[in-house]
Image: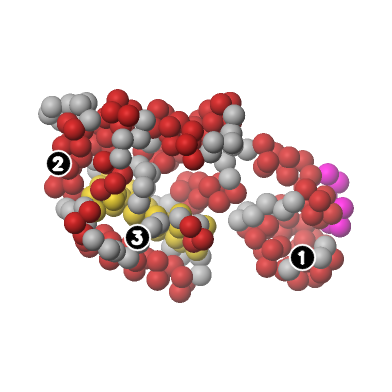
Amino acid sequence: MKLRKLRIRAGWTQRELGDKIPVHHSLIAKFELGNETPSKEINDLLDQLLGADGDLSDLWEHVKRSPVSDSLRNLMEYEAKATAMHMYQAHTVPGLLQTEAYAREVMHHALPWCTAEQIEEKVAARLARRGVLATEAPPLLWMVLDEAVIRRPVGGPSVMGEQLACLREACEAPNVEVQILPFSAGCHAALGGSVTVLSFGNAPNVVYLEGGTLTGMVKDSKGVARHSHRYDRVHASALPPTASGRWIEKAMEDFGRCKTYEPT
């Protein structure tokens, strides 16, 4: 946003600014939207060209110190504004409902190059995302979870049992629905990656993809429609919420965390 304001103040189009770097104008668009962070060299040149007096350089340092990636930061901004989130999660419990121990285990294995301190910063950032569900008017959160999400022992029985108990308790909230997509559903439209459709009161839907080369935000109407269709097909193949709750309870029993479920 800061870059866009400076460019407009200078009277340049994205193409004209890109030519002065030089980089393709589509990259300038990604910088302005926050979908990508420029290299330090390009950022410093932008600061100089636009007369930012070091503001862009200071912002770059702040972004690089942040424990979250560009794509995740973008997702968090949309989560904070969403009125509804419909998601299919292929491999892990959604970040919005992860426990601290579960999140730490996922981060530890997904980011083996990070130090313990960096892992803790990322865990704290992930836990902070749960704040969007604690507002006076929280968004609808409708999740379809692959059976692998509740069966894979992330962190061992204790960590996984605690996570499933948290997930089952979340199902009691009026704005949260959970469905399980069983292995018996076979091949499906979102196989291999996760899909999140975010809806807003007065703005078009957007889609966040996670997995392989598709990772990132989709905003164009045709792309959003296509990926929303993929989600709808997966949603239609999932177990109903009540039956899904029983599957989660059974998984909790298998991990030795409970014999019967009693909501708090």
Q: Residues within 10 Å of mark 1 (few under 14, many from 20)?
A: some
Badge 2 is on which residue? 246
Q: Secondary structure at mark 3?
A: loop
Of badges 3 and 1, nearer the viewer stands: 3
**Horizontal relation, residue 4 to residue 93: left or right:** right
Residue 145 is marked as: none
Badge 1 is on which residue? 23
The alpha-carbon separation of the residues under discs 3 and 1 comes to 35 Å
Coordinates of residue 211 in the picture (x, y in percent) = 45, 55
| Quadrant where the image shows the N terminus | bottom right
Residue 191 is marked as: 3
Coordinates of residue 62 in the picture (x, y in percent) = 70, 39
| Closer to the camera in the image, 170 or 104 | 104
Q: Secondary structure at mark 2?
A: helix
Could you tell me the amino acid type at mark 3? Leu
Could you tell me the amino acid type at mark 1? Val
| Closer to the camera in the image, 192 or 26 | 192
Q: Residue 64's image quarter?
A: top right
The alpha-carbon separation of the residues under discs 3 and 2 comes to 24 Å
Coordinates of residue 202 in the picture (x, y in percent) = 45, 61
